[in-house]
């Protein structure tokens, strides 16, 4: 009995649609961005299109990470994972299938974000919206969602309870980067400053909706993603039950 | 299915120790032993939900299972579980195919109810049906009648026997309800200290211990030298104990033929409980005359 990656992905993406979580998540991303666009268009503000994309990513990245984790949480908390973890192949297929769900969610958020930015730009929001920014935005969203999804997945594999996982992810995406940004602004040590700038826990949440990352940051990001994926895969192969 | 030299250790303590066993399609094998004897670990190794162990599991690995408690989504219906757990394995759940089983287990009419409204017995029954999804060659069931009343328990056991006989499914079943095991199993394995300490056959082997008391030693000697019913396990001055599966009528026929005078006769049926008590507690409790 081999777990069908296609069927698993299709069943569960439909489930995300049917239970309304996907719609709520996208609303959570879009509503702050639309409010920001409204103020830019109707009030005298110094804000630009990058502020719209930043507001889109503010809650949007959190919901985009939590959506694919819904299935991991569901299967581990109800222990139905033991109905899937019945061969090495099925354990791997489960990781790949959930990775594809996370990838699909990140693509959906990317496309929605781009459409939103194009519409608000057309409506008259100021600021440059060039191709390199849109490509950077797309890659950033993909890397951030996959990295934090795999980190959350790993926490579940190590038996961390769902409330704690969601709390940690919320802190990491919403509060921790601001704390690091404050520290970064205060320190004058070049090495420490570069260390913070090239730390994925800092540059992903801070830069995701603002700018393309530097080549070094992309390299560190890709390496982090690969390491997390391998660790999740290996841990999944060994976990009992 | 053949398990060869399985050893499993947890933090240095040996749970299964060089254990080997086999079971076949269409056969129901019972697994009994005290808590901590390694039953669940053994079942998890067979179902590959435990991957790290020494030894090998050979044979067809199409195994359905229900271990410990049914693993269900409380907010989903029974039908969702059957459809989903068929679907993600690339199969389409055909309700007609399972209708008889679901009817017999009285689940058919509640399939559209959410699982959180099910009783423990109903959840167990749904778990058993789920173990039969995707056409397994074997199923492994841990305490399948847990939480069921006597009548429901009987229905489930009857259906399991039918699955083995008609569908050809090999079933490994563990239970602390020895009567359940005895009622349907072809073979019973006694697990103790991580090894199969003993194996008994029950359905095919109706062994009993007969005690015959004769009027004198001459009559006893005549009977003893002419009986070929089974093995003598004790012989006294006037009494003899024989382990046999032969019907009482055959015994009495020989007694009449020999013209010996039998003054007392008892037949003690070998029950799983009596064997279990003998193996694990060192005493016989459940003697049936």
Image (cartoon, helix red, strand yellow):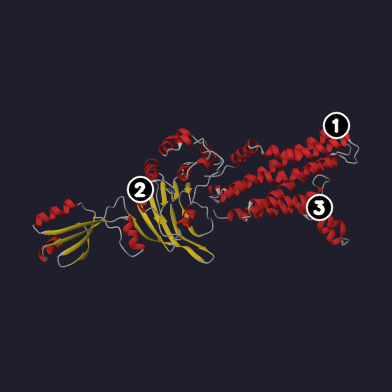
| Residues marked 1 and 3 touching at CB (< 8 Å) | no
Q: Quick one: which residue is furthest to the left in this view?
A: B259
Q: CA separation, marks 3 and 2?
A: 66 Å
Which residue is at the front of the view, A22 or A137? A22
Name above or below for residue B282 compared with residue B178: below
- Tell me if I can see residue A205 in this picture: yes
Q: Position of residue B100 (x, y in %)?
A: 41, 35
Indicate the chain on which mark 1 is placed: A
Q: CA separation, marks 1 and 2?
A: 75 Å
Q: Position of residue B4 (x, y in %)?
A: 44, 58
Earlier along the polypeptide chain: callout 1 or callout 3? Answer: 1
Q: Position of residue B83 (x, y in %)?
A: 53, 37
Mark sitting on residue A123: 1
- Element at label 3: helix
Indicate the chain on which mark 3 is placed: A
Q: Label 3: how many residues lie within 10 Å, few (<14), some (14-19) or many (20+)?
A: some
Q: Position of residue A191 (x, y in %)?
A: 84, 61
| Marks 1 and 2 share the same chain | no
Query: Which residue, given by chain and number where applicable, does mark 3 sit on?
Result: A178
Q: Label 2: how many residues lie within 10 Å, few (<14), some (14-19) or many (20+)?
A: many
Q: How many marks overall?
A: 3
Which residue is at the front of the view, A160 or B131? A160
| Residues marked 3 and 2 touching at CB (< 8 Å) | no
- Tell me if I can see residue B227 in this picture: no
Name above or below for residue B222 compared with residue A145: below
| A57 sits to left or right of B105 | right
Which residue is at the front of the view, A133 or A66? A66
What's the residue at 78%, 41% (across, down)?
Answer: A56
Query: Which residue, given by chain and number where applicable, does mark 2 sit on?
Result: B184
Indicate the chain on which mark 2 is placed: B
């Amino acid at each position: 009995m081999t777990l069908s990656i296609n069927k698993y992905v299709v069943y569960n993406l439909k489930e995300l649609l049917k239970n309304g979580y996907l719609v709520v998540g996208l609303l959570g991303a879009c509503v702050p961005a639309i409010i920001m666009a409204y103020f830019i268009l109707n009030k005298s503000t110094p804000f630009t299109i990058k502020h719209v994309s930043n507001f889109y990513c503010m809650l949007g990245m959190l919901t985009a990470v939590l959506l694919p984790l819904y299935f991991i949480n569901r299967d581990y908390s109800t222990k139905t994972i033991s109905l899937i973890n019945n061969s090495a192949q099925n354990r791997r297929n489960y990781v790949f299938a959930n990775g594809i769900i996370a990838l699909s969610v990140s693509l959906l958020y990317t496309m929605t974000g781009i459409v939103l930015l194009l519409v608000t730009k057309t409506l008259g929001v100021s600021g440059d919206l060039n191709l390199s920014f849109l490509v950077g935005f797309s890659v950033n969203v993909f890397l951030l969602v996959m990295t934090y999804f795999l980190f959350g997945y790993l926490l579940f594999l190590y038996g961390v309870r769902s409330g704690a996982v969601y709390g940690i992810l919320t802190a990491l995406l919403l509060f921790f980067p601001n704390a690091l940004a404050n520290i970064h602004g205060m320190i004058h040590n070049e090495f420490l400053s570069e260390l913070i700038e090239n730390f994925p826990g800092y540059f992903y949440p801070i830069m995701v909706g603002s700018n393309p990352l530097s080549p070094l940051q992309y390299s560190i990001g890709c390496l982090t993603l690969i390491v997390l994926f391998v660790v999740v895969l290996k841990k999944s192969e060994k976990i009992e039950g | 299915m053949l398990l060869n030299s399985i050893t499993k250790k947890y933090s240095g303590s040996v749970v299964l120790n060089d254990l080997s066993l086999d079971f076949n399609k269409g056969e129901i094998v019972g697994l009994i032993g005290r808590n901590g004897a390694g039953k669940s670990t053994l079942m998890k190794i067979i179902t590959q939900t435990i991957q790290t162990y020494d030894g090998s599991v050979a044979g067809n690995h199409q195994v359905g299972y229900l271990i410990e408690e049914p693993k269900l989504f409380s907010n989903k219906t029974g039908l969702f579980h059957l459809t989903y757990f068929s679907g993600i394995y690339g199969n389409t759940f055909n309700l007609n195919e399972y209708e008889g089983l679901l009817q017999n287990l009285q689940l058919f009419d509640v399939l559209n109810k959410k699982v959180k409204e099910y009783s423990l017995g109903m959840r167990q029954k749904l778990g058993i049906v789920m173990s039969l999804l995707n056409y397994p060659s074997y199923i492994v069931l841990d305490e399948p009648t847990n939480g069921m009343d006597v009548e429901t328990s009987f229905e489930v056991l009857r259906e399991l026997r039918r699955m083995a006989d008609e569908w050809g499914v090999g079933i490994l079943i563990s239970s602390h309800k020895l009567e359940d095991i005895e009622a349907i199993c072809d073979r019973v394995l006694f697990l103790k200290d991580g090894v199969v300490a003993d194996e008994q056959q029950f359905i095919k082997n109706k062994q009993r211990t007969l005690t015959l008391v004769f009027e004198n030693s001459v009559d006893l000697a005549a009977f003893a030298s002419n009986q070929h019913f089974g093995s003598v396990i004790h012989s006294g001055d006037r009494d003899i104990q024989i382990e046999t599966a032969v019907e009482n009528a055959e015994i009495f026929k020989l007694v009449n033929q020999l013209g010996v005078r039998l003054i007392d006769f008892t037949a003690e049926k070998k029950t799983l409980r009596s064997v279990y008590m003998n193996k694990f507690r060192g005493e016989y409790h459940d003697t049936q005359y």
